[in-house]
């Protein structure tokens, strides 16, 4: 058994099984035997991830005056990764177990032992670069000029577009985004050839990031950093993660990336089954103070002590001229960086609950925050053989679908239909019964309390939006 499989076997199995059974997450390429640690998002998983992205984008971009969005390429000029430092330093220390040939990350070993066979007979650590390589154009695979990487973070696409955003944004307006501080947000896929991926969707080689680079004046960086740490923690609370399962982790100096002055991770209790309480926690997002490293390193002007250009390849200077103080400088960068997939995993774990009814039957209830629930409302006919009831239920579903994700389901008895919706986190079920044909009203049933309320069909959209706090 490989290390990856070993880890996966102790991960929250009931959640993994629910995710697969109900179409949140499937093992990728399964009909060909799968591909290690690659996952596909099914209908409900795609909705959940869309909800995460939409909430983050609304919060970061739409609800602020000082942040704009960007969608840069996944494949960038190789020089981006040379000057960002990734070619040289984006490595993990790799060791091989001489007994069972498992490849491991030296910094993740307990007591220097192979987790697969327990042997301590390991090779010396050597750096392994995590960037995936490929080649552009119809060229030989060993042509060094054609070598490119799949981006390991979305951030660099923002730095190299700093001047584009600065020059094209509304910088003359009083609340113009391009006056410092201002930020650029991006959501997109990143790729890392992780040595030990695993734990379901926690660590994969292909994943999605939500990153924002917030450009500030040097000297204003520390306060802005702290404000973003607090704001990001609050955002996770706002989308429904419980405070008990979140904590802040101050990265010690030896853990900091080469560009960082200070980094605080928001950790989630991803591994509650582990014996050691300290090992329950792992990173959900990181919030780094990247100083002026990035804009400086991609600029043509900075020189070394002998007057030699540090970056002879760049054609631009990414400095900022402050009209008020008449000073030119490289802005500092505060970077909140989260993962879509890890957020989805934290949401699923946090929402997973079980409830036993009077008959002793245990049901799964996914108590997702309504903004994250893949389906907001399910419309269910009490009698599927009664055309008037079915017709009314379908019409109600159609009337709701322009304003919220609504589904119609008549493939079981009402108890089974409720259970099915509870299991995927649908906050409300609307039942159409015989009485509905008379009084033009329906029963709305709450996922969390199982309480039922009679609501006029004409009032239903407003009623549901109010219950969602909109
Ligand atoms: N630009 C900074 C940066 O990329 P990071 O801490 O390496 O920072 C940010 O990544 C977030 O991206 C992490 O907190 C995590 O949520 C997500 N992430 C990173 N590597 C991942 C992986 N292999 N699988 C899933 N998510 C990952």
Image: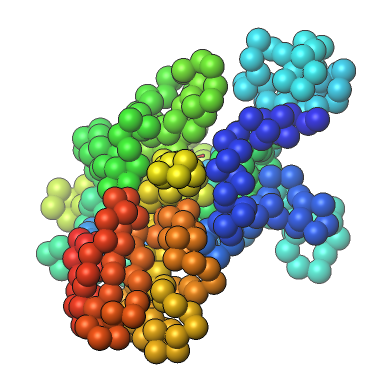
- Residue drawn at (21%, 35%) of the image: 223
| Residue 454 or residue 322, whichever sits in front | 454
Give the vertical position of 112 relative to 141 (above or below). above
Q: Is residue 439 visible?
A: yes
- Residue drawn at (72%, 50%) of the image: 133
Give the vertical position of 49 relative to 263 (above or below). below
- The reply, left or right, for residue 142 in relation to residue 57 is right
| Residue 96 or residue 141, whichever sits in front | 96
**What is the x, y in percent for residue 74?**
58, 59
- The reply, left or right, for residue 28 in relation to residue 238 is right
- The reply, left or right, for residue 313 in relation to residue 97 is left
**What is the x, y in percent for residue 106?**
67, 21
Report the label total.
0
| Residue 280 or residue 396, whichever sits in front | 396
- Residue drawn at (77%, 10%) of the image: 120
Q: Quadrant of the C terminus?
A: bottom left
| Color encoding of the figure | rainbow
Give the vertical position of 436 relative to 340 (above or below). below
- Residue drawn at (57%, 36%) of the image: 12
Q: Is residue 312 visible?
A: no
Q: Quadrant of residue 187?
A: bottom left
| Residue 307 or residue 29, whichever sits in front | 29
Give the vertical position of 392 relative to 173 (above or below). below
**What is the x, y in percent for residue 434?**
34, 80
Q: Quadrant of residue 468?
A: bottom left
Q: Quadrant of the N terminus?
A: top right
**What is the x, y in percent for residue 443?**
28, 69
């Amino acid at each position: 058994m490989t290390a990856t499989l070993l880890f996966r076997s102790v991960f929250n199995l009931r959640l993994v099984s629910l995710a697969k059974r109900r179409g949140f997450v499937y093992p990728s390429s399964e009909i060909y035997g799968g591909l290690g640690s690659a996952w596909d998002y099914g209908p409900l998983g795609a909705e959940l991830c869309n909800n995460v992205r939409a909430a983050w984008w609304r919060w970061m971009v739409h609800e602020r005056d000082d942040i704009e969005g960007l969608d840069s390429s996944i494949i960038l000029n190789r020089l981006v990764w040379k000057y960002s430092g990734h070619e040289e330093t984006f490595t993990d220390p790799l060791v091989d177990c001489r007994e069972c040939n498992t490849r491991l990350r030296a910094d993740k070993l307990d007591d220097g032992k192979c987790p697969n066979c327990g042997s301590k007979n390991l090779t010396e650590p050597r750096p392994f670069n995590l960037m995936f390589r490929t080649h552009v154009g119809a060229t030989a695979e060993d042509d060094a000029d054609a070598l490119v990487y799949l981006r390991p973070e979305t951030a660099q696409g923002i730095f190299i577009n700093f001047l584009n955003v600065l020059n094209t944004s509304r910088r003359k307006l009083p609340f113009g985004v391009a006056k410092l501080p201002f930020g650029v947000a991006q959501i997109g896929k990143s790729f890392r050839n992780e040595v030990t991926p695993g734990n379901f969707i926690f660590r994969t080689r292909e994943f999605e990031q939500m990153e924002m680079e917030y450009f500030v004046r040097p000297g204003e960086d520390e306060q802005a950093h702290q404000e973003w740490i607090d704001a990001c923690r609050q955002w996770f609370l706002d989308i429904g993660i419980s405070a008990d399962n979140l904590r802040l982790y101050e990265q010690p100096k030896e853990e900091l990336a080469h560009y960082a002055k200070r980094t605080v991770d928001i950790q989630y209790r991803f591994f509650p089954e582990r014996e050691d309480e300290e090992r329950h926690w792992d990173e959900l997002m990181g919030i780094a103070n990247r100083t002026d490293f990035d804009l400086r390193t991609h600029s043509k002007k900075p020189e070394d002590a002998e007057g030699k250009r540090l970056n002879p390849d760049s054609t631009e200077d990414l400095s900022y001229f402050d009209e008020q103080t008449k000073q030119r400088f490289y802005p500092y960068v505060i970077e909140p960086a989260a993962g879509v997939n890890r957020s989805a995993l934290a949401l699923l774990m946090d929402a997973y609950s079980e409830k036993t009814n009077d008959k002793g039957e245990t049901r799964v209830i996914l108590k997702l925050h309504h903004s994250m629930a893949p389906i907001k409302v399910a419309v269910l006919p009490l009698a599927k053989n009664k055309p008037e009831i079915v017709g009314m239920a379908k019409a109600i579903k159609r009337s709701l679908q322009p304003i919220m994700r609504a589904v119609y389901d008549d493939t079981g008895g009402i108890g089974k239909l409720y259970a099915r919706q509870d299991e995927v986190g649908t906050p409300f079920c609307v039942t159409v019964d015989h009485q509905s044909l008379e009084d033009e009203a329906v029963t709305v049933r709450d996922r969390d309390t199982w309480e039922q309320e009679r609501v006029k069909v004409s009032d239903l959209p407003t009623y549901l939006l109010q219950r969602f706090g909109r």
